[in-house]
Amino acid sequence: MSPRRVPPLLNVTAVLSLLCATVAAGVAHQRFRAAASQRPQTAHVYKFALRPSCVVPFPNQSPLLDPFPFCDNAGRMAGMPAPTLAQRLRSDAKNNLCAPAQNPTLLTFDDMAALPDASAAELSRTREPLSAVGQAAGVLVGEGSVVRIVGFVRRAHVADCVPVNEPRGGNEANCHQVGFDMSDLRLELAPLPGRHDSDDCDRVIANIIPHLRPAAWRDLDLKTPQDPVRITGQLLYDDESTACRVDGRGRWEIHPVYSIDVCANRDLAHCDGSRETPWRPYDRWVVTPGARVFSSGRSERAACESAAIAVNAGE
């Protein structure tokens, strides 16, 4: 018996169907490739990160994960305008939590005031001119040195959160983000024994950055120590600052802060920054009965929170 033959019309129909499917697939592929070529490229992902082998200076107090990771060390964030080289270098210095902190140099307010000024032209491409610019107790210091200072906290408040004569709020090192947990906390320090009578040019600024900020430090503006403090951190020249323009004073600051200690002895003569006995870490001191605190930055915090709500609402 001879095999059954398929009618020629059926063969033609199958071939045409296969041909149409192939053409349709080819057209769809071409459309996909064309659409893909027109899509915007994936934005670079910026992320704050500690340098290799860096040990955070407050390992027992910092959160396990940075709550503000999407703004990188140089103040860059996806979707934001690219900062200049000078801005990136300055932001990277402000966010440095990795300077060697084993042997901090004790400075006085006079030591800070004696540090030299620098020009914008010098810092346009490098911050090298700021290293080893002065001496204290026979030790060369400059930007990147870890130092400490003893004084009163005149005020503690959130800094650069609310826009002032600028279209954007926030600090450049914090990617101009508006919100309490994305802003620096600023301590305005006054020399012992005075406090309220010191003017802006006599003060020293110490900034606590938002990255990996210890939870206990979050309320420093509401629970500001009345007793002397010892602040340890990186020495930094903030050429962006306009706090005081007398001989460059006010531009050298401690930024970022590495540790905050409070003098547990009410006798100021015993609050020697070179000794360890009278000092207690702020996170332990603030929970002890009788700790003397005051609220110095409540209004700035409220203004910052209101600004954040407005930004999130698209105002």
Image: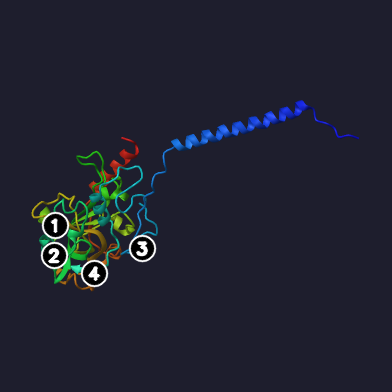
Circle 1 residue = 203
Q: Of the two numbered discs 4 and 1 on the same chain, state the one appearing first in sequence.
A: 1
Q: Mark 1 falls on what kind of element?
A: loop
Q: Is residue 18 visible?
A: yes
Query: Given this view, does label 2 or label 1 mark the residue nearer the observer?
Result: 2
Residue type at mark 3 is Pro
Mark 1: amino acid = Arg
Q: CA distance from mark 2 to mark 1?
A: 19 Å
* The furthest residue to the right: 1
Q: Position of residue 211 (x, y in %)?
A: 32, 55
**Quadrant in which the C terminus is drawn:** top left
Could you classify mark 1 by the number of other residues whose Cα lies within 10 Å: few (under 14), some (14-19), or many (20 or more)?
A: many
The residue most toward the top is 9
Q: Which residue is mark 3?
A: 52
Sequence-first tag of 3 and 2: 3
Left or right placement of residue 61 versus residue 137 in this view: right
The answer to whether the residues at label 3 and label 4 have Cβ atoms under 8 Å apart is no
Q: Residues within 10 Å of mark 3 (few under 14, many from 20)?
A: few
Kindly identify the residue that appears in the image at 86 percent across and 34 percent down: 3
Please say if 308 is above or below 131: above
Nearer-N-terminus badge (4/2): 2
Q: Quadrant of the N terminus?
A: top right
From mark 4 to mark 1, how far is it between C-alphas?
Answer: 22 Å
Drawn side of residue 190 relative to residue 21, left or right: left
Give the Cα distance between marks 3 and 4.
31 Å
Give the image location of residue 22, x and y in percent.
62, 33
Q: Earlier in the sequence, mark 2 or mark 1?
A: 2
SS assignment at label 3? loop
Residue hosting label 2: 134
